[in-house]
Amino acid sequence: SAVISQKPSRDICQRGTSLTIQCQVDSQVTMMFWYRQQPGQSLTLIATANQGSEATYESGFVIDKFPISRPNLTFSTLTVSNMSPEDSSIYLCSETHRGQGTEAFFGQGTRLTVV
Amino acid sequence: QKEVEQDPGPLSVPEGAIVSLNCTYSNSAFQYFMWYRQYSRKGPELLMYTYSSGNKEDGRFTAQVDKSSKYISLFIRDSQPSDSATYLCATGGTSYGKLTFGQGTILTVHP
């Protein structure tokens, strides 16, 4: 598996502001995804980060709230926009390699608290 | 109904016990199945991956899949305090790389 680095690892933000989370992998993976893990809950897929094109969002998630970029095969960002306390969650970056099995690997996550 | 159901526990066992963790799923399109371990304040760590019915063993861990009943299990033998974590089952196959997770089971192994 690739090594996945996320930053920041945690942050406390004021409501109404935005935070951009970065995800860097150490090899050219094919697929990158962003998940959200709300307190005491499991992981929910936000979107698939597509290289050089708009991300593919899951039901309930929209680009205006969670804009995603993926300028190359090793880097992606997720922005949480106009934050409210309900956005307090752990945000996780995930990667998988097409053609090398379908195992998905995760970064350490970004723990976001909105006050 | 959630696509993947998992008993959240918590589950507390003595050291050395055999632990059984279970999930059910509803979507027949799911083709592969994973178990992740998540320690507090860490990202999920892939433990087991399988795509067929039957058993897959790796050290103290055995993953079991029964596609006919849409039931997946993880067994931990000789459990250790270091196994204390949240265990998440996950399924995939409807779209490449995308996973659907169970709620997670909190496991505590006490000495």
Image (cartoon, helix red, strand yellow):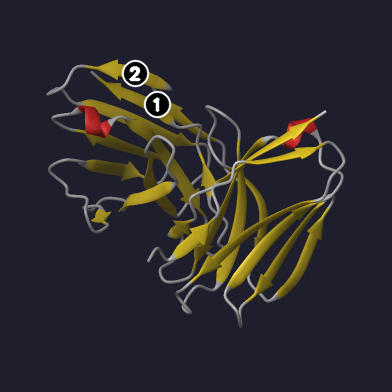
Q: Is residue A13 left or right of residue A24?
A: left
For label 1, the residue is A111
| Residue displayed at 19% across by 17% down | A14
Q: In this view, does A87 lie to the left or right of B35?
A: left
Distance CA(mark 2)–CA(mark 1): 6 Å
Residue B70's quadrant in the figure?
A: bottom right
Observer-nearest of B3 and B54: B3
Q: In this view, does B29 lie above or below A20?
A: below
Q: What residue type is labelled 2?
A: Asp
Q: In this view, does B83 lie above or below A32?
A: above
Q: Which amino acid does label 1 sit on?
A: Arg
- Is any atom of residue A90 visible in this view? yes
Residue A113's quadrant in the figure?
A: top left
Residue B12 rendering spot, x and y as whole percentages: 70, 39
- Label 2 with label 1: CB-CB less than 8 Å: yes
Residue B107 rendering spot, x and y as whole percentages: 66, 40
Residue A77 rendering spot, x and y as whole percentages: 31, 36
Structural crowding at the residue carrying mark 2, measured as other residues with C-alpha within 10 Å and reported as few (<14), some (14–19) or many (≥20): some
Using the image, tell me which numbered label, if any, was put on residue B94. Answer: none
Using the image, tell me which numbered label, if any, was put on residue A11. Answer: 2
Q: Are marks 2 and 1 on the same chain?
A: yes
Chain for numbered disc 2? A
User: Which secondary structure lies at badge 1?
Assistant: strand
Residue B43 rendering spot, x and y as whole percentages: 53, 36
User: Which secondary structure lies at badge 2?
Assistant: strand
